[in-house]
Image (cartoon, grey):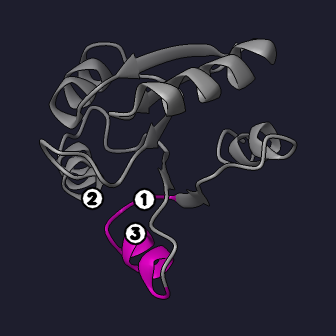
Amino acid sequence: MPRVLYIEDDANNRLLVRRILMAEDFEVMEATNAHDGIAMAAASPPDLILMDISMPDMDGLTATNKIRGMPAIAHLPIVALTANAMTGDREMILKAGCDGYISKPINIDSFVDDIMQFLK
């Protein structure tokens, strides 16, 4: 069963993703802010991190950079899950160290398949 850490400040987004993933037998860990998410990833590394980019305490790009600087977890796949869908955002997110990009609102029908490509 894949373990996913979802770092997201919005409770509704966390609920939707949790329901989708748990229906497919994923184990879902959640952090409501980047600081807690980084600590959770270090303490109990997941198979994949879903990272919101726009969070109030620390943005997802800074959090990704911090994770990439921690040798024990630097290898973890990080997928940005964000409403930032302007021209150039995808490239900026990938350049910052994310392995992939999924825009919000998510496509419920393809979401699990989209994530699975980063777990192989």
Does 14 sit left or right of 21 as displayed? left
> Is residue 11 positioned above or below 115 on the image?
above
* Secondary structure type for disc 3: helix
**Residue type for callout 2:** Leu
* Residue under pointer 3: 93
* Residue under pointer 2: 61
Q: Are marks 1 and 2 in contact (CB under 8 Å)?
A: yes
Foreground pick, 30 / 2: 30
Residue name at image x 35 percent, y 13 percent: 44
Q: How far, Cα to Cα, is label 3 from label 1? A: 6 Å
Q: Which residues are magenta?
A: 87-99
Q: Are marks 3 and 1 in contact (CB under 8 Å)?
A: yes
Q: Are marks 2 and 3 in contact (CB under 8 Å)?
A: yes
Question: Going from the N terminus, do you reach mark 2 or mark 3 first?
Answer: 2
> Is residue 55 positioned above or below 97 on the image?
above
* Secondary structure type for disc 2: helix
Q: How far, Cα to Cα, is label 2 from label 3? A: 7 Å
**Residue type for callout 1:** Cys
Quadrant into which the N terminus falls: top right
* Residue under pointer 1: 98
Question: Going from the N terminus, do you reach mark 1 or mark 2 first?
Answer: 2
* Secondary structure type for disc 1: loop
**Residue type for callout 3:** Ile
Residue name at image x 18 percent, y 55 percent: 62
Does 11 sit left or right of 67 as displayed? right
Image location of residue 113, percent across then percent down? 82, 43
